[in-house]
Image (spheres, rainbow, N blue to C red):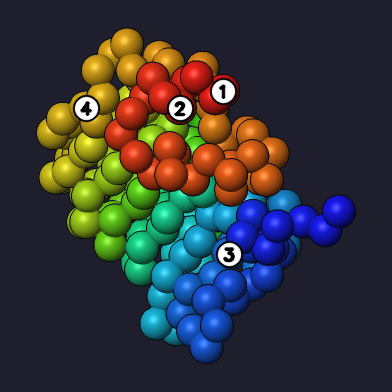
Amino acid sequence: MPADPALIPPDPMTPYPLPGIRRVGFLKPLLDNPLIDVGEYTYYDDPDGPETFEKNVLYHFDFIGDRLVIGRFCAIAWKATFVMNGGNHRTGGISTFPFPIFGGGWSDRHDGEMDFPHKGDTVIGHDVWLGHDCLVMPGVTIGHGAIVAARAVVTEDVPPYAVVAGNPARILRRRFSDADVDTLLRVAWWDWPVETITKHLTLISGGDVAALAAVG
């Protein structure tokens, strides 16, 4: 029996899923950097095209090895920027200038000179909305279902389903009660088969957590 056309989901490997629009694209088929891992259906919107996304991942040097991990079904607005660990400088000495990276006589002058701060991978959960011109600092984890407001500067971890804004970003509110957040994290609809997601989009887009939980 042929599949119901109304339940056929978009192809996550289609770079430009909106007909005639080239500024919005699914990131997964557009990226080949092994240090950037983006889940299916996460999209980026940029007037210059979504293929420019990687230019917004700053100070990302292969020899450092830190990763940017972004989940499924995330919405990333134009100019959202990620500062990686290559942007960190040592701050314990008199000068913050990174002398040793330039080599020559500057490469071996004191103990620990290459021990620059490293805060680990940057991890963005599933179903996260990153607003226009927000800035995510190194090593931050943003929880599932969170919203980062336009021009927010995220310097520390964001709990699941929190809304943050400002510089530095602070929690404005929680989108759901603690009990509902626990339920949503248990249901983890983003891990369902995409056909099941498509079938239950009304519930996923709605506000009835209990009804969604009854499905999952």
Q: Seen in the image, is 177 located left or right of residue 71?
A: left
Give whichever of 27, 18 is nearer the camera.
18
In the rendered image, which residue does mark 2 sit on? 212
Q: Which circle's residue, 3 or 2, is located before the other in the chain? A: 3
Q: Seen in the image, is 78 located left or right of residue 22?
A: left
Q: Seen in the image, is 109 located left or right of residue 192?
A: left
* Circle nearer the viewer, 3 or 1: 1
Check disc 2 and give the amino acid type.
Leu
Q: Which circle's residue, 4 or 2, is located before the other in the chain? A: 4
**Residue at 68% in and 63% down:** 5
**Residue at 30% in and 34% down:** 207
Decide: marks 1, 2 in contact (CB < 8 A)?
yes
* Circle nearer the viewer, 4 or 2: 2
**Residue at 16% in and 30% down:** 173
Q: Where does the C terminus fall, quadrant-wise?
A: top right
In the rendered image, which residue does mark 1 sit on? 216
In the rendered image, which residue does mark 4 sit on? 174
In the rendered image, which residue does mark 3 sit on? 26
